[in-house]
Image: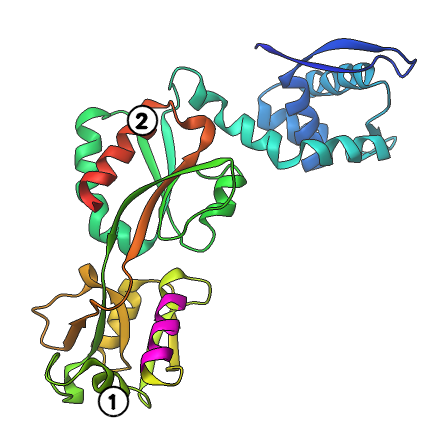
């Protein structure tokens, strides 16, 4: 494996010198520190116990200090103060690098991990997968149906790409706009309210003021966007009766007569006699973004997935 160049004090005896650190030494130390034992690290790396111990000893020689202490007769190890400092400085950054190395080396990674809200996955991704499979039949796509945790998962190295309504702020993540969609007001048909458009929107919304509101769990973009809009239009915040994790769940509750809600227009079956809807043209559309870590920008499978998403979601 190629070496990574660093510089530091050699042997703790003063004088800066260049040192070449095999990344496998850092990987072994990181796993020993994380698991608390050479045995667990050696099993995860598929190397011998002695090889794992030798990796750490070599790193200690280069670092110029003891990093790990092992109690006599015990398989468990503890970090020295220097070891804790080194492990903290490596942290999630090293884990992210290690999880992506196989992706960066000539696109040989056979699995791409993709985060996407559940409703988007159900509604759009069968078609996206058909198009992706036509050009990349041997790449496995592992989907994580999430919303609020996608940015953290990407920074933790758990995702390679994500489709989301939220704009990520971290400079290590690259995002491109895929498109946007409108939101719709939806309510149970059994409430026998005037048909959509029969009265001015302000009057129509005020009719919902005391009725139960079904929305998304706290932190989701559509929830906050909707609460702000309805609060201004109705003159008071809606009465939240139930919250759920995604659009599919919210729609099921509305269809069951448990409240009204605001959901993406594409989730509503207009032929469903159990619900009524009004498209909220006055409400700002929700944007959809494709995100990937910045150093995967040249990966051809990431590029292919982005093109397929744009075709389906634009």
Image vertical order of residue 1 relative to residue 285, above or below: above
Q: Is residue 141 visible?
A: yes
Q: Position of residue 311 (x, y in %)?
A: 18, 39
Left or right: 224 as drawn, with respect to 56: left
The N terminus sits in image quarter: top right
Q: Which residue is mark 1?
A: 207
x and y percent of residue 304 in the render?
26, 29
* Residue that appears at 25% across and 52% down: 180
Which residue is nearer to you in this view: 85 or 1?
A: 85
Location of residue 191 (image quadrant) = bottom left
Q: Which residues are magenta?
A: 224-233
Q: Quadrant of residue 15?
A: top right
**Image location (x, y in percent) of residue 84:** 79, 35
Q: Which comes sooner in the sequence, label 1 or label 2?
A: 1
* Mark 1 or mark 2, whichever is nearer to me: 1
Quarter of the image for residue 283 reads bottom left
Q: Residues within 10 Å of mark 1 (few under 14, many from 20)?
A: few
């Amino acid at each position: 494996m190629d070496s990574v160049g660093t510089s530091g004090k050699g042997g703790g005896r003063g004088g800066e010198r260049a040192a070449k650190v095999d990344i496998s030494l850092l990987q072994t130390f990181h796993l020993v520190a994380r698991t608390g034992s050479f045995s667990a690290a050696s099993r995860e790396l598929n190397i011998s116990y002695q090889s794992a111990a030798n990796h750490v000893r070599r790193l200690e020689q280069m670092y110029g200090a003891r990093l790990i202490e092992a109690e006599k007769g015990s398989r468990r190890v503890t970090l020295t103060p220097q070891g804790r400092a080194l492990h903290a400085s490596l942290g999630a950054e090293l884990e992210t690098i290690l999880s992506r190395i196989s992706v960066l080396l000539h696109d040989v990674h056979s699995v791409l991990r993709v985060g996407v809200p559940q409703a988007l996955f159900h509604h759009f991704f069968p078609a996206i997968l058909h198009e992706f499979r036509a050009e990349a039949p041997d790449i496995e796509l592992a989907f994580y149906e999430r919303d609020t945790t996608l940015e953290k998962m990407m920074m933790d190295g758990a995702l390679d790409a994500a489709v989301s309504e939220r704009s990520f702020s971290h400079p290590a993540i690259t995002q491109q706009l895929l498109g946007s969609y409108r939101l719709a007001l939806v309510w149970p048909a059994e409430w026998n309210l005037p048909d959509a458009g029969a009265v001015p929107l302000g009057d129509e919304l005020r009719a919902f003021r005391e009725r139960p509101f079904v929305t998304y769990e706290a932190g989701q973009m559509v929830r906050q966007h909707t609460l702000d809009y309805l609060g201004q239009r109705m003159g008071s915040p809606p009465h939240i009766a139930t919250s759920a994790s995604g659009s599919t769940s919210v729609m099921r509750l509305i269809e069951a007569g448990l409240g009204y809600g605001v959901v993406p227009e594409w989730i509503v079956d207009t032929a469903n006699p159990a619900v009524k809807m009004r498209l909220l043209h006055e409400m700002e559309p929700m944007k959809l973004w494709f995100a990937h870590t910045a150093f995967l920008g040249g990966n051809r499978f990431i590029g292919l997935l982005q093109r397929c998403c744009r075709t389906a979601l634009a």
